[in-house]
Amino acid sequence: MRRTKRPAKRPTRRHALSTRLWHWLNVICVVIMFMSGLNISNAHPRLYWGQAGFAAREAWLHLPTFPGWATIPGYYSLSGARDWHLLMAWPFAIGLLAMWVAMLANRHFVRDLTTRLNEWRWSAIRADIAAHLRFDFDHGGGKYNFLQKLAYGVVLGILLPGMILTGLAISPGIEPGFGWFVQLVGGRQSARSIHFLFAWGLALFAVLHIVLVIASGPIRQLRDMVTGGRAS
């Protein structure tokens, strides 16, 4: 009997097309929104909680004035910075929604990003920390280790959605019709403070992410995030 040939399996990609498209779109949006946000911050460089007003003595944090090279536009312009911020907010929000739909549909979230109960043991966490400090990125057959899953989970599930929700609460046009939503996050001033903290949390994550990419082989990492790479 003639043996029928089985169709060759297509090589699986390390990063799905949806992940790659969202990654680069998100990089553009977050960078522009962060830099334009610094320009907006220069208009009133103080942060408050609750129903506090605008008096300097009520602020919990007094911010520095950010230089032009760190802002968009590169000079002080509240209206220009708001235009850039809003322009990037829409693709940022829609892109995040699309990414979550894709992650749930292709099981990327369940398969690669969901932590298991045994990963929360202190001995396992300590081993992951020690491996990172040695720049040992062998995940033992898994795509991500515990620390990476935790970091990506916080970013995708808390920081990025939180930026959208607090950004809406800050908007003056939202409060008249959705005052309950603004109060849910503690009022506009609290939302502004949380928005600022989340933004700098994302900045810290980005710095650590870039450092680890450089340490683990930047050429391969960048190539895989463009072409998809091949799963090991």
Image: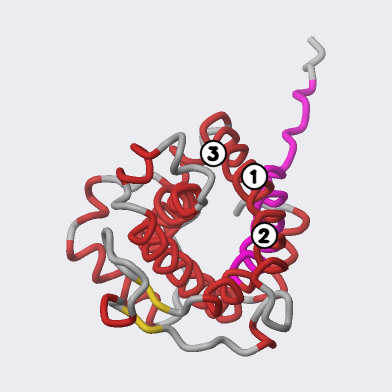
Say what amino acid the circle numbered 2 marks: Cys
Quadrant of res 16: top right
Q: Which residue corresponds to mark 2?
A: 29
Query: Relative to residue 232, is residue 205 drawn left or right?
Result: left
- In the depicted view, which residue is nearer to us: 97 or 68? 68
Range of magenta residues: 5-34
Query: Residue 97, can we see it?
Result: yes
Marking on residue 95? 1
Which secondary structure, mark 3? helix
Image coords of residue 212 (percent x, y): 52, 76
* Looking at the image, residue 55 lies above or below residue 113: below
Q: Residues within 10 Å of mark 2 (few under 14, many from 20)?
A: many
Q: Which mark is residue 219?
A: none
Q: Which residue is mark 3?
A: 100
The residue under the point 73% across, 76% down is: 73
Callout 2 touching callout 1 (CB < 8 Å): yes
- The quadrant of the picture occupied by the N terminus is top right
